[in-house]
Every structure is written in C-alpha cells, then in structure tokens.
Amino acid sequence: MNLAEFIEGRRDQHLAELCEFLRIPSVSAKSEHKPDIEHGARWVAENLRATGFKTVQIVPTNLHPLVYAETLEAPGQPTVLFYGHYDVQPPEPLDLWTSPAFEPTVRNGNLFGRGTADDKGQVHIHLKAFESLQKVNGKLPINVKVLIEGEEEVGSVSLWDYVQKNKEKLKADALIVSDTSMLGKGVPSITYGLRGLNYYQIELTGPERDLHSGVYGGAVPNPLTILTELFARLHDKNFRVTVPGFYDQVASLSKAERKALNALPWKKKDFEKAVGAPGYCGEKGFTTVERLWTRPTFELNGIWGGYQGEGAKTVIPSKAFAKFSTRLVPNQNPQKIAQLVEKHVRKLLPKTVQCKFEILSMGKPWVAPFHNSIFQKAQTALEKGFGRKAVFIREGGSIPFVTQMYDTFKVPCVLIGFGLPDENAHAPDEHIALENYFGGIKAIAHFYSDLATP
C-alpha cells in the first residue's frame, strides 16, 4: 500500500482522533482551564509516543507546559523542526455558536469547534503525516523535532526562554509551521511573509471615583469621552496613521512583488463573505491585498469603562480602558514604533486625565526569500495533496516565534497553512474544511518524504 492509499484508508480514524483532541477545552487565557491545558499537553505527548517518536517530553514552564519530541534516525538526511500550539482562544460569546464550541460537529463538509483551524486541526495534520510515514515506511525518512506550546494565544510568554536555553537541542535545517491560511478554497498556499505585532493597553483616570452624571456632568472630565476622542485622532481622512515617524522605515514593495501579489487568484467575493461588512476602507493608494499583507496598521481592539450592566446607571466613570495594536512591516522596529506611539498618545491627551500606558507584547515582521529548494519541494508536495499548484502569499497576521527562530538559527521557515480566511479562527463557529484537512495530511506526508535526499 502506498502513502496516499494508506492515508485515504484512515480518514474516519483521523477525524475521530481530531475530534477527541478538540473536545479538550485548552483555553490558555483563563486560569480555570489550567487542568484542561495540562490535559491538552498530555494528549499531544501521548499521540507523539503512539506515532513512534523516541523522545517525548512535557516541559513545565511558569505558565503552561511545552511538548518536545524528536526522532533522529535518518543519518545524512535533513532535520526539520515542526512548531505548533495546542492552546485555543476563549469560546465566548457562547450564544453565537451553532453547536457547542468543544463538541466538534460536521456540517456541510466542515468540522466546527474551537481549535479546528487555529491550531489543533493543523497540528493534527502533521501528527498524522508523521504517523502515516512511520506505518508505510517503517520509519521517518528525515530527522524530525517537534515543539508544541500551550501559550501561543497569550503571547508565547515561556517559549522563547525555552528556546534560548535549548539552542543546540532545537537546531534544525528548517522550521515548519502550519498556523496560517490558504488563499482560498482549493488554493494551496505557502506563506513567505508576516506582519509584526505590538500590543498595548491604556488606562485613563479622571475623577478619583465614579460620579453622578447629573450632579457633576459638564464640569468634570469624562475619561471615556477623552479616550474615544484620542482614538478618533489617530487616523487621518486617508486612513493613514497620524503617529509622527510611523511610516519612516516602511520598506516599499518592488514592482515585481507588487505585480505578483496583485495577480494572485484573490477573490473579492470571498473576502466580502469572510468579513461580512458592507464595504472596504483602508490606506489610500494601495489595493486591498497590499493593505492586508504589506502595510502597517493601527487598530483599536477593545474599549471599556463605566456602567455596562442591565438598565441605567448614570455615572461619569473614574476610569476608561482600551487595548490596541500596531501591525508592522519590514524595516519597522517594534521598540521604536512603541516609543513613537506612546509619545504621540501622551501628547494628545489633556492634563485633566492621568495616563497609564503599557506595552504588553512586541513582535517583528518577517519576510523570507522563497526561491530555494525547500520551498519548491513544499510547492510540489501541495500539488500532490490538492491537485493544484500552490501559490506564494504573505499574510497580515503575526507569529513572533517564526521571526525569533529565523533570527536565531538563520534557517528557512516554511509556513504551510490549511485554514481559510473565513473559518472564524478567533470567533464563534470556528471550523476547518475537511477537504483541506485530509488533503493537508497527504501533502505534508509527501513534503516530509520529498525532503529526504536519495
């Protein structure tokens, strides 16, 4: 039995096993899910052992455990490090799920459940590719190291410390990641660029306590009003960020890359379906694809303060809060951008409020050259799995680990995603197309097999 036939014959088994994985509510952001996170780590470790990995370790950290595994039984062959994460986003709001978030359900060719696309489903694709190669060939054709974390959705706070202390152990010829998307349904894709991400929180304090809005309204500063005015001033009419110096180091696209990106089979109707908004907006002078993948942004992610319960409570709130982010592109320095943003925000605020400004995380952008053999082998393998030539894309999201690993080890980072932009990765009704999941197992198994030198 060849590799493709073996994988095809295990479809039901693979799906049942993925559903078992998805039922574990491994939400990293909530302390009450700590036992579930630990369960998720054990599940991954047990699956790797069953797959045939010789060394499997659950590594405790100050927050959530890492899982490390390796099989180094192919002398003279390349070594790859596969990275993924087993933690997931919180499922709220629960009432917007068609079926419960942690009860995976198949509907219309899609598997629904938290973690299906981000990232349990994609991690499982690699686990089953490893297993299939072991079963068909008796061993893996290359040397494989696996690092799967439980903190990606909360900033990977423990991961980099582990990497720094284990550089020799983690050394590989290439880093492989599946935590990205395909360009569209049936369009296999290899991502060669990601935006960086800075994440911030601001707290404004006006009066020392909440005040009666009838007794004091009109005579004291309202932090919520000031905060909303602040964010309204951070973009101009052309949707450019008004922070001085924000664009100074932005790398311009070459004519060739701009032409290639805009020639991709990107479909406006698919974007509109994924977004669910009545129209577009964005920085003047750029196409939607360019705005999404190659331009920096400043986004307000959440704002709160005052009374938000049922009924009425007429107060001037003492405090107002917001979380916001900047997505960065090549040549922008996260530390420099954070300094510029904080300086400008403080300059815009009146003296009637106190400001607490926090930088919660910072991550660099990443763009890789893809005209080399490993990317070409990935493209060939994806064609074997999906029957269509893969395209090379950039994405607007961020994976800080990729940039850190590239800077540390200077090896190719190959990002092969099997999600779709409209699969609600951080929203209710998250799902993955089953044709992409099953096709992904075939493609990744072929990829690892093709990496072996004769």
Image (cartoon, grey):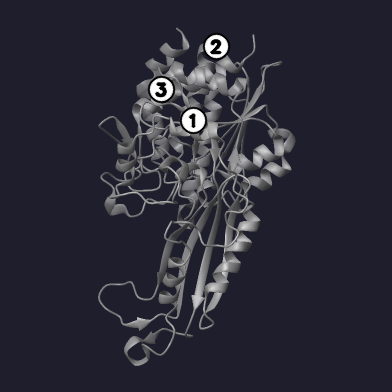
In the image, what residue occupies the spot 58% across and 56% down?
Answer: 361
Tell us which disc is closer to us: 3 or 1.
Answer: 1
**Picture layout, residue 316 above or below residue 116:** below
Tell us which disc is closer to us: 1 or 2.
Answer: 1
| Residue hosting label 3 | 439
Q: Quadrant of residue 82?
A: top right
Point out residue 217 in the picture as x, y percentages from the top left corner. Answer: 36, 88
**Picture layout, residue 389 above or below residue 399:** above
Q: Find the distance from the CA under tag 1 to the CA under tag 2.
A: 39 Å
Point out residue 318 in the picture as x, y percentages from the top left corner. Answer: 45, 81
Q: Earlier in the sequence, mark 1 or mark 2?
A: 2
| Residue hosting label 1 | 260
Amino acid type assigned to the residue bearing label 1 in the image: Ala
Q: Is residue 393 visible?
A: no
Residue 137: assigned label: 2
In terms of secondary structure, where does tag 3 sit?
Answer: helix
Point out residue 161 in the picture as x, y percentages from the top left corner. Answer: 68, 47
Q: Earlier in the sequence, mark 3 or mark 1?
A: 1
